[in-house]
């Protein structure tokens, strides 16, 4: 044989073999295919923090309550009912009588206690461990100041009863019980497999689904759990969850019928928003998230509150939602989105170029003269790309109104986060998504000791307000205190300037898919989704 | 003996590369556990750092890493906490190899004949047409070609799926999008090689001895003319086999190419190091292989 043809034969064989290896047997398409955004980092409910992770994990593991598919409000989950003490501090939960894991083992109150303590332990490294700190002595136990678990307010009274003591009445505690950190997880599997527990088909679950497989960067397949207490209401058998973060690819797969649902707000190509929102399968709804900028209150020139106010009052929010985001976002004068539960809207700063100019002159920079070089920090975004456009728009507004030249400083995500948390910026693009449906999830960010503050601003007065609000059981009075605190934050202190509140998106054809409802916390339990036509 | 020495020399080289990767990722700002929300408590941060040994002195971290490496353990991914780096590579590599292997075949299968023909028809319309095609292939990046292919063949005509992986039909568009650039490079190299060879004395001798034109081209000219392509094959294959971020992302292919980029963005230290070591080893081995092929094709090349 000619050496050349020998070489090519070898290459051809290698290529064919490679092709054969790569092309495994394709599984048949699942009943419902959902495009879910980024690949989940984890499916362990105690450690997850991303929304894509939570959507999958919540279908595998449930807590004492769960989110109602329609309203997003908490409703009975593993617990069928509960009593709340007069002072709002003691909850007694009653588990459903015949609760079973997916393999048939019984679930009892001890499983709940073990799961909560597991999330609380530092070794678990739960990103959301602080949502457990509303429980009496939970924080002290986490920090190692208390060693005896009996002192923590979590006690199993018998196999089906759990008593939970809180530090102060917590209006949103039932919502927290539906949050993944509070989910009940299988002790024996975790103790046997360690870090690798939540991967395979032999995983024992207590939610509406079991896990068929998790192939990273490919798909997660979940299957109806016949032992789930509410199995009769699970509307589908097998669901594939695809990790896709390229907006165009997601849209292509949806349009060609490879996927039934796309539900991540990062998956709407910004340049197509205008076309997409005219379609009947494009759904947008208010969503508890807030887009804003932080000012570095530690250093000049933003140490001067007049400068912060001037910058905040130069932002024409309407222009940003009209020109850039265009997906149903609402210009926001308040930091807490208006659709938040237990909330009374505060007063924020309005767009007022004249007053902004006056404040700048007052601060010693008439028409921007003598103003130092400053920059606006934002993340170089990979997919949707609105952040860069907003940066340019803000830059223009500050130039036009204040006569100030702001340079733009874009960084990739992790570098941006590092710069923000060390307040190494002048002005910084920021956003916050509610962890639970209550103003506190937004307002406690700016407590003096909060790691999420990141502005260098602190106020004892503000801290006291938030503490006071959280000790009040009367929801109306509590909301009033929050309103006072937020008004102070937004109009007197101004460590931040609000821009808009988020809109959630998903696309699905309502002729083919039912069971997805718009709710402000963007919770759409997979078990409620039904395919009514192909 | 020569090749044995070359293989031995690879070991310190790979170690050096791993050390560089290990240090560089830690110098870059931002860490694997930075998130939009601050750590829930200092205890959580401490526990994570302890778990992934980031609380140890740097030299110790590196030696512990080498110790694991000696056992074939690339460590756990810091981003995907339930998966080890090896899990992710083992799961994604076959896909990437398949796509890369096919694109390699595509590049050679299209590039060599194209180069051959354009050289034969130098100055004629076939030459110009071929040159335009390869110029476009070289200049237009995959992130433009890919979406154009999808738009035409997947969305408009619906001949092929727009993405995902599984059946032979899924292979066509990504292979083409990935292989086109390399096919164009190969065709240019082949064309030059062929033109140079045809001016050589031994071709003239063959012609004057009355050897048929077909025999001259295929038997005498082809072998020396293809040598530049052969030297390019090593780096090309290494490029293709380590995957393409753009193509894998665009077609949603579960390979390791996306991890090359994403692990750096995520500061997934162990994942970056693992992939760098994989890439370096692949590159070194393939270059060695090319040298070996070279010596069998060209008897003048001898390694001592």
Image (spheres, coloured by chain):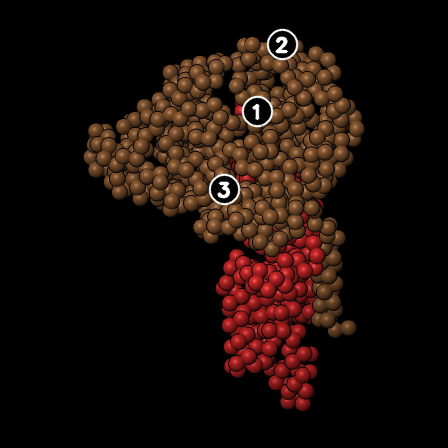
A446 sits left or right of A314 in the view: right
Q: Which residue is mark 3?
A: A284
Mark 3: which secondary structure? Answer: strand
Would residue A340 be seen by someone viewing this image from the given angle? Answer: yes
Would residue A456 be seen by someone viewing this image from the given angle? Answer: no
Distance in Å between CA atoms under marks 2 and 3: 46 Å
Residue B71: percent from left, percent from top: 72, 38
- Between residues A451 and A482, which one lies in front from this camera angle? A482
The first of marks 2 and 1 along the sequence is: 2
- Foreground mark, 2 or 3? 3
B146 w.r.t. B209: above or below:
above
Disc 1 crowd rating (10 Å Cα; few below 14, some 14-19, many 20+) is many
The chain coloured red in the image: B
- Between residues B167 and B106, which one lies in front from this camera angle? B167
Q: Return the mark for residue A431.
A: none
* Circles 2 and 1 in contact, beta carbons < 8 Å: no
A293 w.r.t. B183: above or below:
above
* Circles 2 and 3 in contact, beta carbons < 8 Å: no
Distance in Å between CA atoms under marks 2 and 1: 24 Å
Disc 2 crowd rating (10 Å Cα; few below 14, some 14-19, many 20+) is some
Mark 1: which secondary structure? Answer: helix
The number of numbered discs placed on residues in the rendered structure image is: 3
Which residue lies at the image location 53% right of the left edge and 52% below the top edge? A248
Q: Which residue is mark 1?
A: A175
Residue B213: percent from left, percent from top: 65, 85
Q: Residue B291's image quarter?
A: bottom right
Mark 2: which secondary structure? Answer: helix
Q: Residue A198's image quarter?
A: top right
Q: Which residue is mark 2?
A: A151
Q: Residue B80's image quarter?
A: top right
The chain coloured brown in the image: A
The first of marks 2 and 3 along the sequence is: 2
């Amino acid at each position: 044989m000619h050496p050349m043809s020998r070489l090519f034969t070898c290459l051809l064989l290698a290529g064919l073999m490679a092709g054969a290896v790569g092309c495994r047997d394709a599984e048949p398409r699942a009943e419902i295919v959902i495009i879910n955004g980024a690949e989940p980092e984890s499916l362990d409910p105690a450690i997850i923090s991303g929304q894509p992770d939570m959507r999958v994990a919540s279908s595998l593991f449930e807590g004492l309550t769960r989110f109602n598919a329609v309203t997003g409000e908490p409703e009975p989950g593993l617990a069928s009912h509960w009593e709340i003490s007069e002072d709002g501090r003691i909850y007694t939960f009653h588990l459903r009588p015949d609760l079973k894991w997916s393999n048939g083992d019984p679930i009892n109150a001890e499983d709940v206690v073990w799961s909560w303590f597991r999330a609380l332990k530092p070794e678990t490294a739960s990103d959301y461990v602080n949502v457990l700190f509303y429980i009496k002595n939970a924080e002290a136990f986490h920090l190692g100041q208390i060693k005896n678990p009996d002192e923590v307010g979590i006690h199993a009274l018998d196999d089906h009863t759990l008593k939970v003591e809180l530090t102060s009445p917590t209006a949103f505690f039932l919502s927290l019980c539906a949050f993944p950190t509070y989910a009940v997880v299988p002790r024996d599997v975790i103790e046997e497999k360690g870090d690798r527990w939540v991967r395979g088909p032999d995983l024992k679950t207590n939610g509406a689904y079991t896990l068929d497989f998790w192939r990273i960067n490919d798909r997660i397949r979940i299957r109806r759990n016949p032992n789930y207490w509410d199995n009769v209401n699970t509307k589908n058998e097998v669901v594939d969850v695809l990790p896709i973060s390229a907006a165009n690819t997601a849209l292509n797969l949806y349009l060609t019928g490879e996927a039934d649902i796309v539900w991540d707000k990062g998956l709407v190509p910004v340049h197509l928003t205008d076309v997409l929102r005219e379609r009947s399968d494009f759904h947008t709804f208010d969503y508890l998230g807030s887009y804003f900028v932080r000012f570095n209150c530690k250093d000049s020139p933003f140490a001067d509150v007049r400068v912060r106010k001037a910058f905040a009052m130069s932002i024409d929010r309407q222009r940003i939602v009209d020109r850039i985001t265009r997906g149903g976002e609402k210009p926001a004068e308040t930091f807490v989105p208006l659709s938040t539960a237990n909330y009374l809207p505060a007063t924020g700063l309005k767009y007022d170029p004249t007053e902004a100019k006056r404040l700048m002159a007052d601060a010693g920079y008439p028409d921007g003269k003598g103003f130092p070089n400053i920059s606006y920090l934002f993340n170089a975004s990979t997919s949707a790309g609105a952040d860069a456009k907003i940066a340019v728009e803000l830059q223009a507004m500050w130039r036009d109104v204040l006569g100030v030249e702001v340079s733009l400083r874009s960084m990739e995500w992790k570098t941006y986060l590092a710069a923000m948390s060390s307040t190494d910026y002048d002005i910084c693009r920021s956003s916050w998504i509610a962890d639970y449906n209550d103003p506190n999830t937004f307002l406690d960010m700016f407590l003096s000791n909060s790691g999420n503050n990141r502005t260098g601003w602190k106020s004892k007065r503000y801290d006291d307000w938030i503490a006071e609000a959280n000790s009040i059981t009367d929801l109306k009075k509590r909301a009033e205190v929050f309103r006072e605190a937020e008004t102070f934050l937004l109009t007197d202190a101004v460590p931040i300037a609000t821009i808009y509140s988020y809109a959630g998106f998903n696309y699905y054809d309502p002729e083919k898919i039912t069971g997805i409802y718009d709710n402000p916390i963007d919770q759409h339990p997979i078990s409620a989704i039904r395919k009514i036509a192909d | 003996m020569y090749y044995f020495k070359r293989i031995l020399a690879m070991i310190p080289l790979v170690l050096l590369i791993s050390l560089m990767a290990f240090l560089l990722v830690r110098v870059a700002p931002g860490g694997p556990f930075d998130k939009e929300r601050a750590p829930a408590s200092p205890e959580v941060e401490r526990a994570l750092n302890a778990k992934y040994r980031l609380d140890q002195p740097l030299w110790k971290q590196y030696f512990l890493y080498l110790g694991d490496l000696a056992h074939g353990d690339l460590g756990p991914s810091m981003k995907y906490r339930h998966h080890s780096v090896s899990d992710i590579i083992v799961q994604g590599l076959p896909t990437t190899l398949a796509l890369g292997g096919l694109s390699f075949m595509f590049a050679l299968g299209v590039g060599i004949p194209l180069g051959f023909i354009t050289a034969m028809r130098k100055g004629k319309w076939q030459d110009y047409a071929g040159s335009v095609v390869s110029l476009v292939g070289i200049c237009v990046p995959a992130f433009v070609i890919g979406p154009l292919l999808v738009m035409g063949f997947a969305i408009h005509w619906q001949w092929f799926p727009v993405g995902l992986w599984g059946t032979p039909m899924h292979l066509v568009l990504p292979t083409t999008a990935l292989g086109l650039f390399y096919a164009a490079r190969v065709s240019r190299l082949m064309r030059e090689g062929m033109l140079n060879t045809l001016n050589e004395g031994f071709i003239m001798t063959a012609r004057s001895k009355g050897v048929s034109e077909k025999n001259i081209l295929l038997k005498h000219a082809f072998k020396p003319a293809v040598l530049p392509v052969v030297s390019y094959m090593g780096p090309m294959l290494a490029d293709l086999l380590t995957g393409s971020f753009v193509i894998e992302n665009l077609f949603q292919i579960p390979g390791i190419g996306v991890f090359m980029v994403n692990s750096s963005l995520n500061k997934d230290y162990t994942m970056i190091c693992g992939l760098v070591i994989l890439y370096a080893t692949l590159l070194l081995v393939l270059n060695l292989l090319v040298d070996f092929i070279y010596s069998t094709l060209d008897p003048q090349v001898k390694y001592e």
